[in-house]
Amino acid sequence: MTIRADIERMPGDELLRLARVLKVPIVVRTIKRSWLVDKVLKELEKRDAKIPIALESPAIQISSVTKNFGKKTAVRKLNLRVEPGEIVGLVGPNGAGKTTTLRMLTGIIRATSGSIQVDGYDIVDEAISAKERIGYIPEKPTCYPSLTAREYVMFTSRIYRVPHETALIRMREFVELFQFEEFIDTYIGTLSKGNLQRALLIGIFAREPPYILALDEPIYGLDPRGAWNLKKLLRRLRDEGSAVLISTHILEVAADLCDRFVIMNEADVVGHGTLEELQKLHPDTNSLEEIFLSLTGGIPE
Amino acid sequence: MSTFKLMKNEIRMLRNQFKSAITSPSMLLFYSVTFFGIFFVSSVISTFVSFAPLFFNFSVLLEETLDMGMIFAATAVLSASSVVSGYFGLGPAAVLTLEDESLMMSAPVKPHQIFLSRYARRILRKISFITIGVLAILPLLISASLLFFAAVSLLAIIIISLEINYFLGAMSSYVRLWISRKTQHRLRHLIVIALGAIALLPAHPWLLSNVSAIYVAPSNALALFLTESTGIFSQGIPPLYSIIFIMIGFMVCLLLTANICGYEYYELFSDNKGREQTEGRFSKIIRGEIDFSKSQFTDPMIWIMMKDFWSRLRSPMQIWKYIYAVVGTVFVLYLNIVKPIWFPPIIVPIGLAFAIVPAFILMMILFVQMGSVTSMLSFVDERDNIYLLKASPFNPRDIILSKYLLSLFEVAITVIPACGFLIYFIHIEGYLAVITLIAPLTILFTATGSAFGAYVPVMTNDPKTLPVPLALSFPIINLGLGAIMVLLVAIFSDSMLILVILPLFTLSLVYFFLALSLRALNTYK
Ligand SMILES: Nc1ncnc2c1ncn2[C@@H]1O[C@H](COP(=O)(O)OP(=O)(O)OP(=O)(O)O)[C@@H](O)[C@H]1O
Ligand SMILES: [Mg+2]
């Protein structure tokens, strides 16, 4: 099992902490590592395996949503749904309204009109239940600078009511995946942009799947290896039943990762569907890039 | 439950901040400069002036010139002004940060939980600063033979009352949201007048003398505490009552404020941030997106000044500052020329005459100091754009000089009315000689301000928040420099040498601080 591997990779203090959380009786002064690992695993087995919860269908339902900033309309009559087990790409030029859409979806700002449901919960009326499911990476990642990455991950997992042992094990798993070990105890204020993004991602994935992810340009700050890892991870999560809405204008990433696309331009949806469907509609194009360009102002000569 | 988790997190952040502050030498240096500076200044002051008789005289003077109603009126005006300014403010949204927006607003926590935890941190911070501050002014307290306990409790009660006022402001911001939801009528904001009037009501003389329950009102409780604990106009009510009233008021207001924290404050925060961003974008012009050769000025220095001037003018406070400068100057000129009867200057009692010159000078230095805060902020206002500015094809010297010159203008226009008022209000012998010091003080303090502001990005990665130790040691250093300048003038006042020494002193220090700013600009993180 992968849990065994994660636990074996834990440094000593983390393992001890996990043992303490699980209330493994430790009476002797010196203990063998392998003994402790076995004990911890046995203790984990004793806790009956949770029946994995499945997301409502659709996981994200945006119905006829409009957002005005004063006189300016940032999003107009947007309809969008994301099913569990699906990665949807929200693409569009700068200022199209992608970030605004994700901010409304995550309950940061309110739609001027229309309604948004996350996992069946209305984001306005049942905000807490809806938000508990969402994992959000903002466009400009920021985090409390005076926390260490570890403190931050533990803090968010408490806010999202993740059992402590789960958070510890999952944190280890994703620290390995994103090669974050050397930064886990540094202050977030001193992390580079990409590493900050990794810290936020670890904070999200320390929670239990399935997820509803709202990712605003998540690839942008990551190096090629980090990006590759994230893409692989997202595909795995999709196959396990998570729903992902990704905003990006890096079209290679979108074409490579997403099952479906919603193309926005100046607050409106100008095209949607799978790559094949879009290509059928626009027979004279032969890539997502060309479809994108022709839908958002024409292909330049 | 969640609230406690959030609070624990806030406290952890505070602890980490403290840890990193005492382990980084520059922060520690500034903290100790502040602490020992205040300690030093207060012990110097207390050896020069014996405060105990001063306080005694002062309370007699107060009883002679004021009447009791005025104290109650003053605290009520204080409350009313926070209610009115709070109405136009952000309310509880003011405690939110960018980090909260990206992490907490999308998390399953309620707005009031964020508010309460953030507030807990604010209180803890305040308590620790007060403790340090009281320790630093210990010599003064001892010399004034004020009881330590009395001084601390006075301070604490005043601060709690200010917190109550902050809550009142927050609630009044809620009224704005509420009424804007009910009606879009153009006159709806007139309700702020009613709110202000309600805050003033408890000080009404008839209520004060006939309805004893009115003393529970926070502003009255504060006034009662002030009169009873200092003995001025004491009515013989134990101060404990007023303390209880104030604590009750505090709890009630805290809970009410927590209760009004709703998701609409998220919206308010984002809106406000959007506005800031457009301001920031404006300053990006300097990146070279604008063609300098087409501008009518060829000098990049003037360009930075123009940009600063206009981008500052876009912030809502700035226009009021200019209005204040113009109206204040006109008013002060009127006062000094016409000397109206309806606004007499204070007549200093004979017993206090010995203290009036130092008091005048101290107030003068403080006024100039308060004005010069702008110059410290001129770099902080750039926010992250400071890096853009640094990366732009300007000579760093031009950047510093342009910031300095524009700040000098801004500081001067705030200082002039304040000092003019001071001159009119407190007449001292030979004030002409003293007020000429305003010019060198302004020139010098603006330079220290520039240097301090320029050092912000050196000390932190986050150029938009002023580190606390810098903010604290700025006035202290200025106070020290001002004191030295006054001392120089006092020593050489009889010889012509002063005409050389004073400019030399000022200009060399200005040069020093500007050089320091330059050095700072060249060593950004
Ligand atoms: N708080 C705000 N106040 C006013 N206008 C806003 C605000 N937030 C966004 N807008 C406007 O709404 C429009 C959509 O912005 P949004 O950030 O959603 O674009 P985007 O698709 O994410 O663009 P990008 O690819 O550049 O990130 C823009 O024109 C923007 O100026
Ligand atoms: Mg965006």
Image (cartoon, coloured by chain):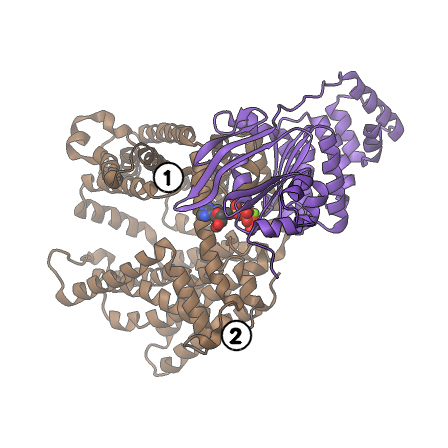
Is the residue at mark 1 in contact range of ligand 1, meaning its CB lies under 8 Å from it? Answer: no
Give the vertical position of B315 relative to B168 (above or below).
below
Give the vertical position of B519 relative to B40 (above or below).
below
Q: Across the whole image, how many numbered discs are drawn on residues?
A: 2
List x then y, in percent, for residue A7.
81, 31
Residue A149 is labelled as none
Query: Are tags 1 and 2 found on a single chain?
Result: yes
- From the viewer's side, name the closer residue of B475 and A236: A236
Placement of the C terminus of chain B among the 4 image quadrants: bottom right
Residue that mark 2 sits on: B397
Give the vertical position of B35 relative to A43 (above or below).
below
Q: Is residue B281 left or right of residue B319?
A: right
Look at the numbered disc 1 and give the secondary structure of its residue: helix
Look at the numbered disc 2 and give the secondary structure of its residue: helix
Quarter of the figure with residue B172: top left
Residue B27 appears anywhere in the view: yes
Chain B shade: brown
Q: Chain of mark 1?
A: B
Chain A shade: purple
> Which three-letter amino acid code belongs to the residue tagged 1?
Tyr
List x then y, in percent, for residue B105.
53, 36
Question: How many angstroms separate mark 1 from mark 2 (CA)?
Answer: 42 Å
The residue located at (58%, 67%) in the rendering is B391
Point out the frontmost of discs 1 and 2: 2
Residue that mark 1 sits on: B166
> Which three-letter amino acid code belongs to the residue tagged 2?
Arg
The residue located at (77%, 48%) in the rendering is A225
Q: Chain of mark 2?
A: B
List x then y, in percent, for residue B463.
54, 56
Q: Is residue A190 left or right of residue B304?
A: right
- From the viewer's side, name the closer residue of B40 and B441: B441
Placement of the N terminus of chain B among the 4 image quadrants: top right
